[in-house]
Image (cartoon, grey):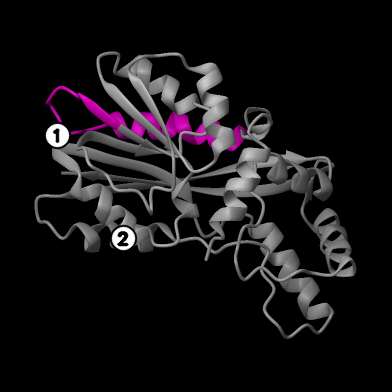
C-alpha cells in the first residue's frame, strides 16, 4: 500500500527538480499522446478532458496544443506540483485541482481521461478505473501509461542477491510491485465489463544510464518517486552499501550502470 502522505511530501518537495530528472516520463508522454490518438472510434468534438497526475505540466501543455477548444481539468495529489504547474501554464481553459483522485468525487463527465506515469501510485487501481469509466462520455477514451513488472529489474536483482548473501529471512523490497501488461489489460476488461468497450495495450522498454548506483538513487529521489510504501522496512546502511556495490559491479555497460523502465500503455475506448 502507498502512504499517500509520504507521496505528497516527496513530490511536493521535488517539484522544482522534476523536469530536470524525469527523462523517461517525458518519453512516455510522447508515446502516450501518439497511442491516445491512434485508431479512435471517437469522432465527436472533444469538449472536456480530465488529466490525472498533471505534475509539472508537460502533458497538459501537449493537450492544450492538441485540443485548443477543450476544457481541461488537471489533477495532482501534490500541492508542490500544483504550484509548479500554475507558474508555467496560464490558460483560462485549464482548471487545476490538488487532490487524490482515489478519494475525489467526480461530478462532471469527460470525452478524454488521460494520465502519464501516475497509475502506479493508486492503492485500488481497479476501483479507480471503474470510477473514471463511469464518468466517461459515450465514444470517450481513457488512456494512461504506468510502469510494468520489469521496471528496475536490476535493482530488484541486487536486493535479492544481497538478501541471500546476508541470510536475511524477512521481506525487504526495493520498492513497490508493478503489474504485467497482461494483468493490467485483463483488469481493464474485467472492470469495464461491456462488450462495446475496446481495450488496447502496448509496452516498451526504456533505459537510463548513470555514472554509478548513487547517481541512479539520486535521480529517483529528485523526481519524488522514492519508496512511499506503508510497509517499507528500514534497511541497514550495510545492506544498502552491499546493494550499491553489487549494482556497480554487475550492471555496468560502457562504464555506466543501467536502469530498466518497463512502460505500459492502456487505452479504453467506450
Give the residue drawn at x 77%, y 54%.
Answer: 251
Q: Which residue is mark 2?
A: 127
Q: Toward the viewer: 244 or 64? A: 64
Which of the two discs, 1 and 2, sits closer to the camera? 2
Q: Is residue 133 toward the left or the right of residue 144 in the image? A: left
- Spatial distance from mark 1 to mark 2, Cα to Cα? 25 Å
Q: Toward the viewer: 227 or 240? A: 227
The quarter of the rendered structure image containing the C terminus is top left
Horizontal and vertical percent position of residue 191: 23, 61
Q: Is residue 229 above or below residue 144?
A: below
Of mark 1 and mark 2, the one earlier in the sequence is: 1
Task: Residue 68: name its quadrant.
Answer: top left
Q: Residues within 10 Å of mark 2 (few under 14, many from 20)?
A: few
User: Helix, strand or loop at disc 2?
Assistant: helix
Q: Residues within 10 Å of mark 1 (few under 14, many from 20)?
A: few
Report if residue 27 lies within the magenta region.
yes
- Asked whether the residues under the numbered discs 1 and 2 touch, taking CB atoms below 8 Å apart as contact, a structural biologist would say no
Q: Is residue 53 above or below residue 186?
A: above
Report if residue 164 lies within the magenta region.
no
Q: Is residue 77 above or below residue 168?
A: above
Residue 199 seen in this snapshot: no
User: Helix, strand or loop at disc 1?
Assistant: loop
- Magenta stretch? 23-49
Q: Is residue 57 above or below residue 132?
A: above
Q: Which residue is mark 1?
A: 41
Horizontal and vertical percent position of residue 3: 57, 60
Q: Which mark is residue 256?
A: none
Amino acid at each position: 500500500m502507498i502512504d499517500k502522505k509520504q507521496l505528497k511530501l516527496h513530490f511536493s518537495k521535488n517539484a522544482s527538480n522534476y523536469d530536470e530528472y524525469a527523462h523517461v516520463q517525458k518519453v512516455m508522454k510522447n508515446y502516450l499522446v501518439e497511442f491516445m490518438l491512434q485508431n479512435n472510434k471517437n469522432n465527436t468534438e472533444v469538449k472536456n478532458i480530465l488529466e490525472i497526475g498533471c505534475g509539472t505540466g508537460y502533458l497538459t501543455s501537449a493537450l492544450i496544443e492538441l485540443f485548443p477548444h477543450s476544457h481541461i481539468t488537471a489533477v495532482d495529489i501534490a500541492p508542490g506540483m500544483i504550484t509548479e504547474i500554475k507558474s508555467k501554464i496560464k490558460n483560462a481553459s485549464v482548471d487545476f485541482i490538488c487532490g487524490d483522485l482515489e478519494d475525489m468525487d467526480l461530478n462532471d463527465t469527460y470525452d478524454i481521461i488521460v494520465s502519464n506515469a501516475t497509475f502506479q501510485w493508486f492503492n485500488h487501481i481497479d476501483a479507480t478505473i471503474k470510477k473514471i469509466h463511469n464518468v466517461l462520455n459515450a465514444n470517450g477514451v481513457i488512456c494512461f501509461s504506468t510502469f510494468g513488472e520489469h521496471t528496475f529489474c536490476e535493482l530488484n536483482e541486487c536486493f535479492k542477491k544481497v538478501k541471500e548473501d546476508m541470510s536475511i529471512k524477512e521481506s525487504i523490497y526495493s520498492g513497490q510491485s508493478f503489474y504485467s501488461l497482461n494483468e493490467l489489460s485483463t483488469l481493464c476488461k474485467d472492470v469495464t465489463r461491456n462488450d462495446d468497450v475496446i481495450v488496447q495495450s502496448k509496452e516498451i522498454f526504456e533505459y537510463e544510464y548513470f555514472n554509478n548506483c548513487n547517481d541512479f538513487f539520486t535521480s529517483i529521489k529528485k523526481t519524488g518517486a522514492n519508496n512511499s510504501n506503508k510497509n517499507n522496512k528500514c534497511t541497514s546502511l550495510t545492506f544498502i552499501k552491499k546493494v550499491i556495490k553489487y549494482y556497480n559491479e554487475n550492471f555496468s555497460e560502457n562504464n555506466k550502470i543501467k536502469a530498466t523502465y518497463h512502460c505500459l500503455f492502456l487505452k479504453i475506448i467506450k
